[in-house]
Amino acid sequence: MNPPRRTLPALALATGLLVVLSIVAYTARDRLYRAVAGLDRMPPEAMRDAIDLTARQGLLVLVAITGLVSIVAWRRGRDSFVLLACLGAGTISAYLTSELVKLVVREERPCRTLDPVTVLACPAPGDWSWPSNHSTIAAALATACILVVRRSWYVVAPIAALIALSRVGAGVHYVHDVTAGLAVGIVVTCAVGLLGNTVVRPLLAPRPHPVRGPRAAATPTEVLETPPPTPTCGPLPERKGPHAAKRLPTGSLG
């Protein structure tokens, strides 16, 4: 199974927009963080609970939706399920890529540098900020669902965006952290998943069995090269039975 033609251009457009947003957000990262997270006061209790729940458990919702998509893929056939499995490998690769980039960039979290009042407790030192792992995984799961069931984007895309925004609202990430994480999730999942699907699908395709039919007619060359049968010398075998020809006695015709 190949993804619908309109899906990949839409994902490429979304990735481009996220990259632009990341660049713009980085230039005003402290100001945007203060606007979204709020440093001077805690949000109302209902909003705080919603942010906390989304930031902590939002990925579980996407995991559950991915499970439903896997059932749909299984019912559609082998090709759909193989594509989803390869995209699952892409999701893992996206997370590992995010962790590797964190170790290279080593950006400190805003809750540690700005010392705000946050909904979630600030992670321990050495748990770097850019890019956001939660946003990366959310975008990777959403991308996998969209590439298998295109109409699922109505549900999974808003959920992934809410998870990313909640990480900023909870005070543990800058805006450019989550936009970059979303872009990483889309790009790596598409690259690894689609490449893996291209390689694995032919290997799992059923091989046709040779058809056994009547023996093919010999070609003219084979006819010419086939030696004629060797004649045998000697008396013909004598027929036996009631219809056998009777021998005439010797000298009966003379």
Image (tube, helix red, strand yellow):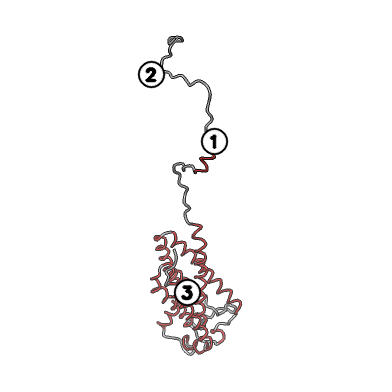
| Residue 243, label in figure | 2
Q: CA distance from mark 3 to mark 2?
A: 93 Å
Q: In the figure, residue 131 lies in which quadrant?
A: bottom right
Q: Which residue is the site of mark 3?
A: 139
Q: Which residue is mark 1?
A: 227
Residue drawn at x 58%, y 82% is: 108
Comparing labels 1 and 3, the label whose residue is closer to the camera? 1
Q: Regarding mark 1 in the picture, which secondary structure is present there?
A: loop
Amino acid type indicated by mark 1:
Pro
Q: Quadrant of the N terminus?
A: bottom left
Disc on the earlier residue, 1 or 2: 1
Q: How many marks?
A: 3
Q: Under tag 3, what secondary structure?
A: helix
**Camera-nearest label, 1 or 2:** 1
Residue 231 pos. (x, y %): 52, 28
First along the sequence among labels 3 and 2: 3
Q: CA distance from mark 1 to mark 3?
A: 74 Å
Q: Is residue 167 above or below residue 211?
A: below
Task: Please name whichever residue, 128 or 136, is drawn nearer the observer in this view of the structure.
Answer: 136
> Which residue appears at 55% of the width and 80% of the height?
130
The residue under the point 48% across, 63% down is 85
Specify which label sits upstream in the sequence, 1 or 3. Answer: 3
Q: Position of residue 86 (x, y in %)?
A: 49, 64
Dot 3 amino acid type: Ala
Labels 3 and 2 touching (C-beta < 8 A): no
What residue occupies the far front of the structure in this picture? 254
Rendered position, 246 above or below 178: above
Neighbours of disc 3 within 10 Å: few (<14), some (14-19), many (20+): many
Residue 63 spot, x, y in % from top left: 45, 69
Numbered circle sitting on residue 205 = none
Considering depth in this image, is 190 or 102 the residue closer to the camera? 190
